[in-house]
Image: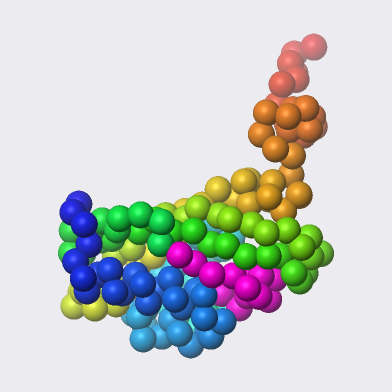
Amino acid sequence: MKPATTAVGTLMDRFDAAWSSGDPSAFTPICSPDLHYEDPLCSEPLEGPAELGAHAEQLWAGFPDVRVEPTGARLSDGRFVAAPCKALGTHRNELAGLPATERFVVVQVIVYAELDPPRERLWRVRAFFDLYDAAVQLGVLPRRGTLGERALLMLRGFGFNRSR
């Protein structure tokens, strides 16, 4: 992969801006009508820009100040693009049953996308991020390497010798 062309870079800028916009319809002009989207918070793949917009609305509800910013060079072969970015925001409202923590969270994300056949819109998109780290920042899970993490792992059955 090489650095992304201006057109691909602009498309990814618009994708980041859509996530920061608070407008679920912002995904429509940049995503293919048969978009396939996945990230660690999706219980199943999302189909189409409307489903992605509804997914984003959940994020905006919990993090009304969320913004997405690029963090490095975007790489592309003209058909596929890898784009590092970060999502930043303050957890101000209930989200998926989790009461507001008022904590500021920074989540590093890699977006890996395939463009549609005319190479004008996003078609197949996967966003990768560390969900455990996000939960730690929110205070839901213990930091890695701490006694709390070891206790949690023991409760889940890791570290016990089951033959005894």
Of residue 19 and residue 161, the one placed in the foreground of this image is: 19
Of residue 6 and residue 123, the one placed in the foreground of this image is: 6
Q: Position of residue 156 (x, y in %)?
A: 75, 34
Considering only vertical position in the picture, is 27 above or below 85?
below
Q: Quadrant of residue 162 in the image?
A: top right
Range of the magenta residues? 55-69
Q: How is the image coloured?
A: rainbow
Residue 152 located left or right of residue 43: right
Where, quadrant-wise, is the C terminus in this rendering? top right
Q: Looking at the image, which residue is at 55% across and 48% down?
A: 130
Q: Position of residue 149 (x, y in %)?
A: 73, 33
Q: Position of residue 101 (x, y in %)?
A: 78, 60
Q: Quadrant of residue 163 in the image?
A: top right
Q: Looking at the image, which residue is at 41% across and 85% down?
A: 28
Residue 47 located left or right of residue 61: left
Queried whether the magenta region covers residue 66, the answer comes back as yes
Residue 63 located left or right of residue 68: right
Q: Can residue 64 be seen by looking at this rendering?
A: yes
